Amino acid sequence: MKKNDSRIYDPAVECMDRDELHRIQLERLKETVKLVYDKVPMYRERMDAKGVKPEDIQTLEDLSKLPFTNKSDLRDQFPFGLLAADKSEIVRIQGSSGTTGKPIVSGYTENDVEVWTEMVARALAAAGGGKDDIVQVTYGYGLFTGGLGAHQGATRIGAMTVPMSSGNTQRQLMMMHDLGATMLCCTPSYAIFLGESLKELGYDLSEFQLKSGCFGAEPWTEEMRDKLEELFDINAYNIYGLTEIAGPGVSYECPAKDGMHICEDHVIAEIIDPETGEPLPYGTRGELVFTTITKTGMPMIRYRTHDICVLTEEPCSCGRTHVRMGRITGRTDDMLIIRGVNVFPSQIESALLRVSGVAPHYMLIVDRVNSTDTLEVQVELTDEMFSDKVADLERVRDEIKEQIKSVVGISATVKLVPPKSIQRSEGKAKRTIDKRGLTE
Ligand code: DLL
């Protein structure tokens, strides 16, 4: 593994005394609560319903008096219902998958883009990034926050930024080799695929300059870290984030590689019991909840991420004082992340419903073959279709594939199965079999 030349981007903030940090958090929390109460009808109505006024927030513990926010709120308020700023102040829209075919979107003011940029700059510096680096950004550019987020952070640290976006493996490797990229930002699964392709295409690793990578947007494991560090001879760092809060950089790993520091001067993290909604102490596994305290476009109050992890307040050997979150070990909902794309079974269902002749009985089988996620969608035929000609069945299969691609944005293998062959469940239908072993 290459030498670790990690830096602390903003020591005054990242290594701040925790009492001082809490003081800043409280001040910012009060401002944010007042802002949403004044500007966002949904928050005002919910706070009124709970009998909470902005003045009731006097300590950080008072946060638990506030109502939760969910992905469904972003869907219901789509596209601009949750804005706390005037639309004319919004300079960017980013988005991610919702539970239906429509994405959920978040609006950013200039301030929000700045805050987010700073978060990613911290992550890249922690991974050794600086002005002498060449950062290859292989996250997708577009509504997805990966590409533009990493791009902004890399530009901020003064690195030479290479906006490759995702896909086209041969071209990625050629550029990485010819430009001498020193850092790579992409999903961990694609990074493994790139590393394996590098070998297969006969490249000599000693001709590459790569020293580290910031990998995230999907769950991964320590085994994958070992593999990546070996394949590229680099330091592989985890980076976490979500569109609703900012994008990548909400938390990031330092050289201790023992959890991701949360940018606590910009967000307050809680762990709650997903069943009861009660806050849980540090060290207990539960659902991660974020409240933004510096966002002005679309602040989020107690946003339930559905990601399961543990928070620790234990001091870190790197000197940063912000709490760390462990790897995401599961979700409390049925969201899958396939090739870095968030996929809800309900989206597949709505794609199937657009095709006549198929029953709404289906099963998603997710696997990882040669380091690439695969999705097989097994779809039950109706009795009428079952007796149809092969050509007709092929047409149905192609149509399903097309609809899935258009609704979900990823390609799937479609397998038509006989009527009544997919097991019926008495309770909540089990729609997915995930064979990747990434979550508990
Ligand atoms: O995935 C933002 C991002 C881009 C993070 C690039 C890191 C790197 P969304 O598309 O909104 O945003 O998806 C957010 O992805 O709630 C987690 O379930 C999952 N996720 C993100 N990072 C990690 C990670 C981006 N490091 C959802 N480990 C989150 C595990 C992750 N899961």
Image (cartoon, rainbow, N blue to C red):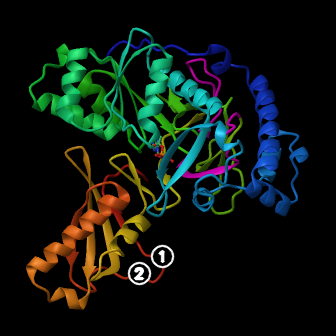
- The residue segment tinted magenta is 294-322
**In front of the other: 143 or 191:** 143
Q: Position of residue 294 (x, y in %)?
A: 70, 33
The three-letter code of the residue at mark 2 reads Ser
Depicted 283 relative to depicted 263: above or below:
below
Is the residue under label 1 in contact with that under label 2 (CB below 8 Å)? Answer: yes
Left or right: 368, with 116 as reference point: left
Residue located 8% across and 26% down the image: 202
- Bin the neighbour count of mark 1 within 10 Å (Cα to Cα): few under 14, some 14-19, many 20 and up: few
Image location (x, y in percent) of residue 246:
57, 38
Left or right of residue 22, residue 199 in this image:
left
Using the image, determine if residue 106 lies above or below residue 417. Answer: above
Image coordinates for residue 374, horizontal then vertical, percent: 25, 54
Tag 2 secondary structure? loop
Q: Quarter-wise, where is residue 414 in the image? A: bottom left
Q: Which mark is residue 394?
A: none
| Residue 417 shows in this picture | yes
Kind of residue at disc 1: Lys
